[in-house]
Image: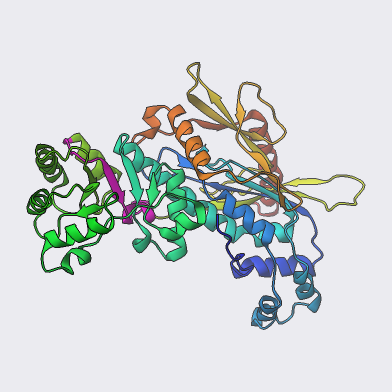
Amino acid sequence: MADRPRPSALLTDLYELTMAAAYFENNIRATASFELFVRALPRDRGYLVAAGLEQALDYLESLRFTSEEIDFLRRQEVFRRVSDAFFESLRAFRFTGEVWAAPEGTLVFAEEPLLRVTAPIAEAQIVETFLLSTLTFQTLIATKAARVVEAAQGRGVVEFGTRRAHGPEAGVLAARAAFIGGCIGTSNVEAGYRFGIPTYGTLAHSFVMAYAEEGESFRQFQRVFPEHSVLLVDTYDTLGAIEKIIQLGLRPKGVRLDSGDLVELSRAVRRRLDKAGLTETKIFGSGDLNEFSIQEALARGAAVDFFGVGTELATSKDAPALGGVYKLVELEAPPGQAVREVHYRAKFSEDKVSSPGRKQVFRFRDPQGLYDHDLIGLADETYLAAEPLLIPVMRNGCSTVAPRSLLDLQQHARQSLQRLPTRYRQLQNPPAYPVRPSAALAALLERVRQAVLQPAAKKNPR
């Protein structure tokens, strides 16, 4: 795996830094716990595949403010009245907290924490933006990839979306997440270099058009790549291109269909290749594909061995954003006080309630070993019949887990999906997987609700 420059400490929203300054100036040093979760799953999603944790932990371990970054902040008008002491504190800033998280490849559902941060409140606040951006994006793409792979019914899916991704780095991370979600590889060379993902490539229409004769372009490409040539055959006439390949005596590894009726063309191409003895030549389908079009094509009998999926996968086009939130759930007085004082925090605004307290997700299985339901409980609860999903991954600002290979993460995701009953994996209108709060969490939520809302009602009688 190739090393990358550390992310800038300024990759955050301004209000994270203004809040940090206000905490500093008002001498707020409490330890805070925040939880990152998704309130509701996107349309047609029955689950999410957690991804992005490795990049999140790398960021937390390496987080530093440079002198240039601190000087930039000093010059901002909003910080004009902030003391020099705050900016000096940024020179020594480190993330020193604790993190619990669902391992990458784990299935998660609405309201379940993907990650919990416990740290001095300013530290926990500053990292919010990066954590949300990193985890929600990769989780979104890993989930999309899992759906596409499910639709492909065992046929290989290659991530082709770099050129349509929302920027070069998004393309690299989309390739990583797509591999966790089940893709066999990517067209993105940087992702292959950085993460060890298998890379795949064919050729473009421009290569065919660079030659005066289509057949000559095929012959010259296969001369250079005799064992790895996948020839693009739809530049002019798909079936005519297949005839040229046969007449020239070429034996390409594969042919790619990028336009036209994928079902009819793939079946016609397969028949002609087989008749010519090219039974080992694979058919690669691409061209604005997604899980729905792949499912339909295979249901109609498409003779496709591999799929290349680009725009729809790298942008999760039908559900391009995941509504992740990062909510304060608990405050504890800073170290040194004689009595440990914990304050639970929850949000009660309409349609945006968040539950108090540090939590754990407990997953129960049925007698056949399939996932049956989840219980969101408090972190100190224990259920012997359930699997707790959140594990400790960072302590005192240092990672406590070794990075796992992407193949391991992909296998974990695959096994998790196999344990999820089929009805929750269906591509359209899946039922909601059962998730409920524990009795202890429900009681704590009600206690905090009464403490917060009853005094307000007394102050504002109707």
Would residue 167 be found to the left or right of residue 58 on screen?
Answer: left
Considering the whole magenta stretch, tell me its main secondary structure: loop
| Quarter of the picture holding the N terminus | bottom right
Q: Residue at x 38, y 55 (%)?
A: 314
On screen, 457 above or below 296?
Answer: below
- Residue closest to the far right: 338
- Residue closest to the far top: 367
Q: Residue at x 46, y 42 (%)?
A: 48
Residue 303 visible from this viewpoint: yes
Out of 357 and 254, give the one closest to the viewer. 254
Image coordinates of residue 35 in percent, x first then y, are 63, 48
- Colour convention: rainbow
Out of 448 and 288, give the one closest to the viewer. 288
Out of 353 and 159, give the one closest to the viewer. 159
For the record, the magenta segment spans 300-319
Residue 128 colored in magenta in the image: no
On screen, 62 above or below 138?
Answer: below
Image coordinates of residue 303 in percent, x first then y, are 18, 38
Image coordinates of residue 433 in percent, x first then y, are 46, 32
Image coordinates of residue 327 in percent, x first then y, are 62, 51
On screen, 342 above or below 26?
Answer: above
Q: Which residue is drawn at 80% across and 59% down?
A: 29
On screen, 162 above or below 149?
Answer: below
Residue 307 colored in magenta in the image: yes
Total number of numbered labels?
A: 0
Residue 323 visible from this viewpoint: no
